[in-house]
Image: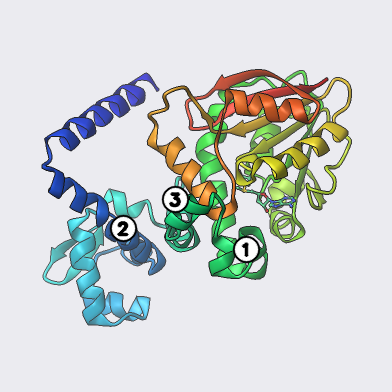
Amino acid sequence: MLKMKFLNQIVRLLDKTRNKLTPPPVRLRELAFSYFQAQVVHAVAFLEIPEHTADAPKTLEELATLTQADPDALGRLLRVSSLFGLTREVGARRYSCTPVGQLLRRGIPNSMYSLAVSSGREWYGAMNHLPEAIRTGRCTFADHYGVPFFQYMAENPDSAGVYNDSMTALSRREVPAILAEYDFSSRKHIVDVAGGLGHCIHSILEKHPHLEGTLFDQESVIAKARTNTDLAARCNFATGNFFEEIPAGGDTYVMQRALHNWNDEEALKILKNFRRALPDDGLLLLFETAIRENEIDSGRLNSDLLMLCMMDGRERDRDQFRELLKAAGLELKRIIPTRSISSIIEAVGV
Ligand SMILES: C[S@@+](CC[C@H](N)C(=O)[O-])C[C@H]1O[C@@H](n2cnc3c(N)ncnc32)[C@H](O)[C@@H]1O
């Protein structure tokens, strides 16, 4: 882990030096046109080129048939994706994927397919309206997609499928870091609120077999989670709306990366419902990005802008968490950093 941290620091330093040395017009051009990279990643993932080249390189014509693409347009995409280091030409008009491109395969451990597709579609669409969001201070997703983000997901099962998988992909990276820092052994019943497809609660229950667990989310998401037989054998399911009620019965409530989807007024309603559900010895654990003083991690700061554009949400710092929790009748006990982007925000009822 130290090695990774050290490498990240070196990469950041190199980036900083490179930015300083790059002439301003060149740097601006790079920034202004960086959407090419995002959309080329999206197209390569969406067309499942890594999947089609997994066993052996394919000719352009074979790939065009497999992806139902126009051969000329596909050749132009592959020329650019090879420049970006996602694919490579291994013979005349024969292509394979690089180790970076292979991360876009579906169903492999650490697959980034769903993240790339979701991020290139609705997240990208939401960020397209950043200037409006900055001017108004509000999310404009509904102005362009007709309905707020989670309603859009409920009405578009195809997008929802990829989005829920992308949340699981993020969870896979974060949960081991959370479990390394937090000891659940003295707890009895964990309720994972807005727990998506259940990766987080599943991992907690696997590590602590004595625990009972409940996964709570919207009906449409729980319907998919129930099909995971491993999870179903170990976990209760509950459906509902956390703005109305959070189910009682747990002694430990967790919520991963969901409070940041909401503005302060909405987040307060959710926290008040947590307060109602918490027993006297109850614990609330939020697994969220906590913005640090003089934050320099672009992942945390980018996520803050994405939350603004997509859902009217935000990332919060220690004071903002403390104040929100206090207004809901909760007390912030600790913020425990982890080696992932998420910290553990521990709170109790007052
Ligand atoms: C950002 S995702 C996080 C999912 C999960 N915790 C994870 O990290 O993979 C937010 C979750 O909030 C759920 N959600 C949104 N609105 C909700 C509501 N009103 N009541 C209950 N859950 C809701 C969504 O269905 C989604 O699963």
- Residue 79, given in percent of the width and then of the height, sits at 18, 66
Asked if residue 113 lies left or right of residue 195, the reply is left
Circle 1: element type: helix
Residue at 36% from the left image edge and 76% from the top image edge: 67
Distance, label 2 to label 3, CA atoms, is 22 Å
Can you tell which of label 2 and label 3 is closer to the viewer?
Answer: 2
Front residue of this view, candidates 227 and 127: 127
Q: Residue 35: which disc?
A: 2
Give residue 261's position: percent from left, percent from top.
61, 46
> Which residue is farthest front?
135
Task: Give yes or no for contact between labels 2 and 1 (Cβ–Cβ under 8 Å).
Answer: no
Q: CA distance from mark 2 to mark 1?
A: 24 Å
Q: Is mark 2 within 8 Å of ligand 1?
A: no
Between marks 1 and 3 in the image, the one whose residue lies nearer the viewer: 1
Q: Name which residue type carries label 3.
A: Ser
User: Are discs 2 and 3 less than 8 Å apart at CB?
Assistant: no
Q: Choose top left, top right, bottom left or bottom right for residue 186.
A: top right
Q: CA distance from mark 1 to mark 3?
A: 22 Å
Q: Position of residue 49 (x, y in %)?
A: 33, 66
| Left or right side of 178 for 190 | right
Residue matched to label 3: 111
Q: At label 1, which amino acid type do we have?
A: Met
| Beta carbon at label 1 within 8 Å of ligand 1 | yes
The quadrant in which residue 53 appears is bottom left
Labels 2, 1: front one: 2
Q: Position of residue 152 (x, y in %)?
A: 62, 65
Relative depth, front residue between 24 and 165:
24
Give me the residue at 78% from left, 27% from top: 210
